[in-house]
Amino acid sequence: MRDKFFAAISILIGIALALAVGEAVCRFLPVNDGLMAMPVNASAPVFHFTPNRNVTWSRDWNFSIVNRIRVNNAGYVNEQNYEANDSRPLLAVVGDSYVEAAMVPPQDTLQGRLAKALAPAIRVYSFAASGAPLSQYLAWAREAREKWKAQALIIVVVGNDFDESLAIYKQGPGFHHYVAGAGGALRLQRFDYEPSLLRLAARKSALARYVLFNLQAHEHLPALANEFMSVVRPARADNFVGNTSASADADRLRWSKAAVLAFLHDLSAYAGWPPGSVLCVVDGIRYPSDNPAVAASYFVQMREFFIAAARRAGYEATDMDPAFFTHFRATGERFEFPTDGHWNGLAHLLAADTALHSALLSGWKPTAPQASR
């Protein structure tokens, strides 16, 4: 028993030393700091991050992308503080990780370029977080109008915004999602969030953040488990179009279309935005394709449905693919990072130019955005 006791102690000491060395090394590396979501509940009903922080954002084990960003006084990723008493007109930009844009230098984001082009007469504030769908955009759109007095709104719509608006497909902690009522009607519901003690403790450790954010252990471990199980039960390969599964099964399409219609209704009824004040910028497949499987994919069907439904409801909706296709044919340049599927600076530039030439913004007569790609 004594030998076993000392062996166990030796193992624990070795593990502790290894963790200490790992922690020390990670503190000298550009480990992802994490954006640190705040609790969401009845007294704080809108998702945002811990305010007033300068953050290092990075991805992958080898830090393939490193960026320096700021979480401002309102708890959003934006270089500027938000001021409710500023009398200048305010344009709000709402979206998910494409607008959060933690991987893009702030001045090269859609909102950064618009802010520069419209300054000093017009302010541009952004409201976004990774993983948010259309249903969550409503909460930010409402806050932008009620709290910050925004007068115009841009919503960036991407591939996973449709089905992930429904609680049957996803329940993001702190986000709003649609749930079906007794008669099948969709109702917006907030899913509260409270950071666990383990997560709060992990935020203090550079090694823990490296494992969670850079290695994405919470995503890869289930994948490894599935790969192990596939030895017994082969898994079906799944294709992706628009950074979401290409599978267009009938139930997924039916529920997603219902979510789009509920969103367009609630954009006015819940968030208070009339059609003439909103522009929806819809991501595309980005590169020309004559593949029938792409044309029949979930994302292509849903983006076409969204654009048509938005326009029928009176909202301006612009398709990014014409701009993407034209630029790609002329230059061959890509619109995402080699190790990350989000828009790069070039895609944000084209989105900003598209927005500036929209019916919503053209009346403000801004100058063309000038920023590095």
Image (cartoon, helix red, strand yellow):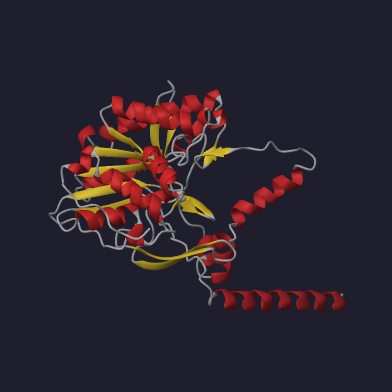
At 30% across and 58% down in the image, what residue appears?
Answer: 74
Give the percent coordinates (x, y) of residue 134.
39, 39
Residue found at x 35% / y 26%: 308
**Is residue 151 toward the left or the right of residue 294 in the image?**
left
State whether residue 83 is above or below residue 19: above
Question: For this view, does 157 lie left or right of residue 198?
Answer: left
Q: In the rendered view, tell whether residue 43 sits above or below residue 299.
A: below
Judge whether residue 77 can be spotted in this image. no
Q: Picture quarter containing residue 77?
A: bottom left
Q: Residue at x 26, y 48 (%)?
A: 92
Q: Left or right: where does residue 277 sit relative to residue 332? A: left
Seen from the viewer's position, the closer of residues 219 and 61 is 61
Q: Quadrant of the N terminus?
A: bottom right
Q: Nearer the viewer, residue 140 or 341?
A: 341
Locate residue 373, reporting x and y percent.
38, 58
Res 229 seen here: yes
